[in-house]
Image (cartoon, rainbow, N blue to C red):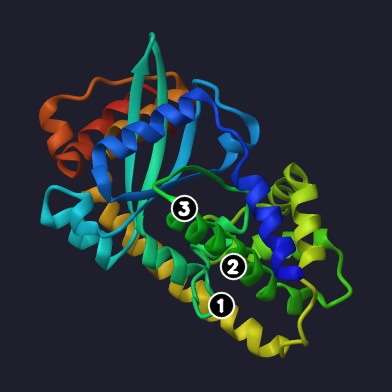
Amino acid sequence: MSGERIGEIIEAEARRPGFPEAFEMVEEIRRRHGGSVAAVLFYGSCRRTGWVEDSVLDFYALVDGYRDAYAGWAPAFFNWLLPPNVHYVDLERGGKHIRAKYAVFSMAQFSRGAGPQALLSSVWGRFAQPTSILYARGPAEDAAVLAALAQSARTMMANARPLVGPEAGPRALWTTAFRESYRSELRSESDERYAHLYEASEGFYEALAAAVPAAPQTDRASLERRWARRRLIGKLMAVLRHIKAAYTFENGLEYVLWKIERHSGIAVAVTPWQKRHPLLAAPRLAWSLYRRGAFR
């Protein structure tokens, strides 16, 4: 019965309606990657709070295979070698901008990444959190995504419960899970951030904790060693992904400059040459922004 209950909880969140701007971005993602797109997932802060123009929507595009998702071999190869590839989109609609980041991941890798054998938490740590399926190509793809989302929640809790003990409440369970998962990437947050994540969807996390009973206690020491390996490998992989992103993050320069403008109010124009050669252009742009007081 617990398997049925967790499926109901996950599906109720997955069917949460999106808003027009999110669906416009889904259509843009599908236009870019064609029939290879099996599903598009919507998650993150904008899903929790609603879209405003001065924000970035977060999506995962799940594809059949990378070679079919790209016109060239290079992005397909790097997406396979070190998934995911990340893309930035800025759509102008009716005089307003709709901005988004989306990651491209294969359905097969997504399903494996949600499972208990996956060492890194990059999939199950992210998608144990509330997620909407805004597009699925058919019933089979929809069912596969729902199964992976449910498995992500189970894997996340299984990797946190031994750290807090079987009698811990859902708040302690989930804030611990968030802390350990985020520490395995290059984005550690404060305890207040983990509490905020829990409180933003408290009913969802309480229901999941109740639906998945505690399993026989895993040896805490062995699990802590596994988390230590996860942190080491996860941070190394994150660094490698950042290096890759310098070459493959589509429109990455525009995204960084937009973020700077958003926080400092200082904008710079980007030339076509700078767009084609972001690494070569970066020192001069950084110096210009520094002189104008964009950062200190």
**Three-letter amino acid code of the residue under disc 2:** Gln
Q: Secondary structure at mark 2?
A: helix
Amino acid identity at mark 1: Pro
Task: Looking at this view, name the residue that lies furthest to the right.
Answer: 167
Q: Which amino acid, mark 3?
A: Pro
Seen at 84% across and 77% down, the residue is 166
Question: Which corner quadrant holds the C terminus?
Answer: top left
- For disc 1, the marked residue is 116
Q: Position of residue 153 (x, y in %)?
A: 64, 64
Give the residue at mark 3: 139
| Left or right for 136, reference 224 | left
Label 1 crowd (10 A; few <14 / some 14-19 / many >=20): some
Identity of the residue drawn at 45% across and 72% down: 112
Comparing marks 3 and 1, which lies closer to the viewer? 3
Q: Are marks 2 and 3 in contact (CB under 8 Å)?
A: no
Q: Where is mark 2, residue-wise?
A: 151
Please tell me which residue is depicted at 65% across the width and 75% down the height of the picture: 159
Q: Quadrant of residue 212?
A: bottom right
Per the model, the C-alpha gap separating discs 2 and 1 is 8 Å
